[in-house]
Image (tube, coloured by chain):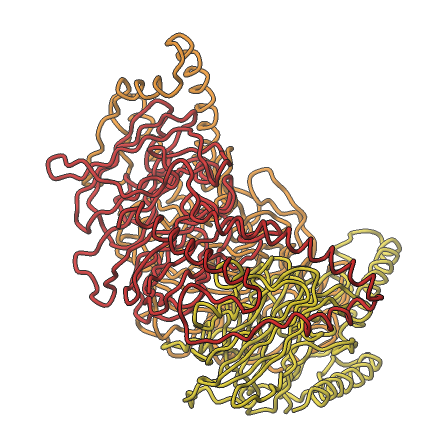
Chain colours: A red, B yellow, C orange
Amino acid sequence: MSDTSVIDGAAELLTKQTSRRRFLRDSAVTAFVAGVATACKPETKTATAAQAPAAGQTGGTMGAHDTAAGSATAAADAMDAMHEKGIKAFPAKTAGKGNQLFAPRMDNGVKVFELTAKKIQWETEPGHFVEAWAYNDQVPGPQIRVREGDRVRLVLHNNLPESTAIHCHGLELPFDQDGVPFITQPPVKPGETYTYEFTAPNPGSHMYHSHHNAAKQVGMGLLGAFVVAPKRPNARHRADVDYVMIINDSYHGYTLNGKGFPATEPIVAKKGQTVRLRYMNEGQMIHPMHLHGMHMTVIARDGWDLASPYKCDTVNVAPGERWDVLVKCTNPGTWALHCHILPHAESEHGMFGMVTALVVQG
Amino acid sequence: MSDTSVIDGAAELLTKQTSRRRFLRDSAVTAFVAGVATACKPETKTATAAQAPAAGQTGGTMGAHDTAAGSATAAADAMDAMHEKGIKAFPAKTAGKGNQLFAPRMDNGVKVFELTAKKIQWETEPGHFVEAWAYNDQVPGPQIRVREGDRVRLVLHNNLPESTAIHCHGLELPFDQDGVPFITQPPVKPGETYTYEFTAPNPGSHMYHSHHNAAKQVGMGLLGAFVVAPKRPNARHRADVDYVMIINDSYHGYTLNGKGFPATEPIVAKKGQTVRLRYMNEGQMIHPMHLHGMHMTVIARDGWDLASPYKCDTVNVAPGERWDVLVKCTNPGTWALHCHILPHAESEHGMFGMVTALVVQG
Amino acid sequence: MSDTSVIDGAAELLTKQTSRRRFLRDSAVTAFVAGVATACKPETKTATAAQAPAAGQTGGTMGAHDTAAGSATAAADAMDAMHEKGIKAFPAKTAGKGNQLFAPRMDNGVKVFELTAKKIQWETEPGHFVEAWAYNDQVPGPQIRVREGDRVRLVLHNNLPESTAIHCHGLELPFDQDGVPFITQPPVKPGETYTYEFTAPNPGSHMYHSHHNAAKQVGMGLLGAFVVAPKRPNARHRADVDYVMIINDSYHGYTLNGKGFPATEPIVAKKGQTVRLRYMNEGQMIHPMHLHGMHMTVIARDGWDLASPYKCDTVNVAPGERWDVLVKCTNPGTWALHCHILPHAESEHGMFGMVTALVVQG
């Protein structure tokens, strides 16, 4: 599924809902019914009944109450308008897209990935630009996917004003390929090129990132996914959609794959399909990722299959961790998927930051 | 067991201990023996022996030492008095009690829960009042318990100055019952009433809370437990006491079920009984809940039974998570149960916040 | 293996690497090859090729570019020199060593551990002294190791200016030995001695620490490991090296066993050996400990064996938790082992705080 079709699909779905919603609200006599059909019959709203407790609450005279209620309503409407605006903008277009699948160049049987680290401007949400330190102009850097046993070469061009190095986080590499300056290699100076080469070892969801002045360099964007497919995949882990979600929280605010809501990317699947989500935390805080409407089955951590998978709806992802989950998409809808540390996801101005949606098309 | 008898039982137990303690301390020649009988024989304190290292520590003359030791003792006594005062006050009475079991009204086979959201004053610890946004004047809101397959109706009356909505966190509901304004429904405006209706789906320990301006609204108290009992309970999970503990940490300070120590509620069981604790985190930080004296067996997360339960004494509960544990009450005593992020539980003024006790009556 | 030989071994290994590194860098025509032999052949650096994208990046004239590149290089070199200095200093000598194995005095079949709590000066990294509140002049306090069923006596001498008490965290003790002032015992006043005595109960990785004014007293250093060996050890958990790592993060900065990098202690094993790491968190934050080069198999939490062990490379340790892992040392090298909250491990001045290494000698 192309990125464009994903975004268009979700936008269409939300537009349909919004149109129907506007109609329903404008009709003003029946409760809102969501775009996705259900067997459920919400009761009608009864404005009259509701006014009574409101009056009881303020305890003022009816006149004073009317005025207070009027200004409260106006304030509530103003806040709601901000919330609605954000949601209607989702998925918002921004310049630049990170975490794009990285097609390697083949060199005599070796998969070669050229990575150029440099400063760029990065749009995290519409109109909000930040300085980023990026691989190949992407935050996160391009998504590397190889197969266990592949010969892999990473060629790092350092166009930053600082030295750097790449550590493949989670890969059990020979010592001199581990990417820690002054321990396994010299730092890669500004203007220099450095080459790593190894055979892809232990499969799973891994990462690559700077391991030099890393609190800053990783925070600024020098990070990406490094997924090693197993030679013998576990048949129970077959998925129709395989999605990497990299969480970050430092210099660029609260982001999922380098973007904050409403510029985050929805994940789209059809009813009955299975989605594999690979959560990776490159930030400095935990982020308990919560999915609405369906549960997740946790199948792997740090790339290693769990002998005893378990179900949950909230996966607490700590810095450096990777968690793979399967979602069996049984329930149609546009399901919120967000960090449940609420100040990472919503303010009085509406949702922002670590919010996206899993769209299950009925 | 009624709430009153629980509190009175714990108070009596602590009073007994305190009385005996005072006697023992006043007698001044024997070590303190707790109110709960054990086979253990602590040695006597030897004040003379203890003075020697104290003198060695200060290294002053005996006269100077005496003065320094005197003022150090006075300061220590003053601090200890504050600590003792807090513990003697436990469980302290405060106005209002949250998380009370919610008896539904039956309407033609449907269990109806009416929830009125409004601003109240809430006493978190004796004499400390905060503004709360509460369901039915309770923080947490009343505890909803239904059975898998029950038809359930939630009627929300919004008497707040802001719009709101209820999301049933963890329940796999049809899309239009999910409670996310502008995605699954319009916001419920001040003065309005909105109705949710659904069949109770996946069993387990779940929650309900606002999903509109939620960082504020949940932080202010719009939250509660939603427990769905399974049609076929797991016999190994049978418990004599079933206790929901909702953790929160934002606008109202560090609270367990809406109260800070010493106003928190003790959990009381008899020796040999099994207690099921359902931890739920509605806050913005992790809270590793630590039990003294006995271990916990973790049996479920987010309402889903674990295929492979495990034992521990510290359960790290992240925002949005629910963890169910069993405690086999083999060890009589008043066992501290607290968040092990120590600044959430104790200051120089004594214990506060996220501290309570599991009382095992011998 | 004595402490001295561990440190000397690691120092020697790093010195060898540094010497070879200096040679390799000075030769300036070939990439750095680490001291540990591998089959990997890094490509040579091509400085000419690298200059081109650098020029493209700045977009200035060649003259201006040269000047800018020159000052960028100087700044990078200055930063790198700080990073290198820290790494070359590892493992740095400091006064005092915590967590030393505590040999008990035997008294009629009872293992007696005398603990004196007092204020000391503690060197966390070279030249950086802090006030510590310590047991027996060590931070962490001396490491207690007993066997399940042993009779144990802890004699606490309080030479602090405050009252205190010892709680054995994780041990299921009789109530009056639990160490919580005003609940299970009176506080132990300045100058007093207090004695605990019990039979070592549930085996595993536990801790002892103050439970009075504990946010301060534990933060200042009143803590230590309390490991209870099982009567019947699990044969699959046999290890050649058994290492306790206590994590702390409050008054003394980010420390592992009381020291910050480069004064942290490397863990040393030979290729083919198995290392058992016992992580214990006595701090106030989570610390996801990440190991390079090899995975960890998590076998126990809070001292309790897991029925279903799992593999990972990052273990998120929350306050109060203990996690036991096995590392099968298959991969020779000096492997970084650090908290993956990067600001706990690295700044622009180089690595610091929660960083050490697992040295696998080939």
Q: Give the farthest residue toward the top.
A: C63
Which residue is at a point 43% across and 27% down the rendered structure image?
A162
Q: Position of residue A85 (x, y in %)?
A: 53, 48
Horizontally, residue C50 falls left or right of residue B287, namely left
Q: Position of residue C136 (x, y in %)?
A: 62, 58
Relative to A146, residue C314 above or below: below
Relative to A74, residue C47 above or below: above
Relative to A288, residue A44 above or below: below
Relative to C294, residue B340 above or below: below
In front of the other: C266 or B169 = B169
Q: Position of residue A257 (x, y in %)?
A: 40, 46
Quadrant occupied by the N terminus of chain C: bottom left
Q: Does residue C278 show up?
A: no
Which residue is at a point 30% across and 69% down the rendered structure image?
A307
Horizontally, residue A132 falls left or right of residue C140, namely left
Which residue is at a point 69% across and 64% down the rendered structure image?
B160
In front of the other: C276 or C54 = C54
Q: Position of residue C67 (x, y in %)?
A: 43, 11
In front of the other: C187 or C46 = C46
In front of the other: C71 or C332 = C71
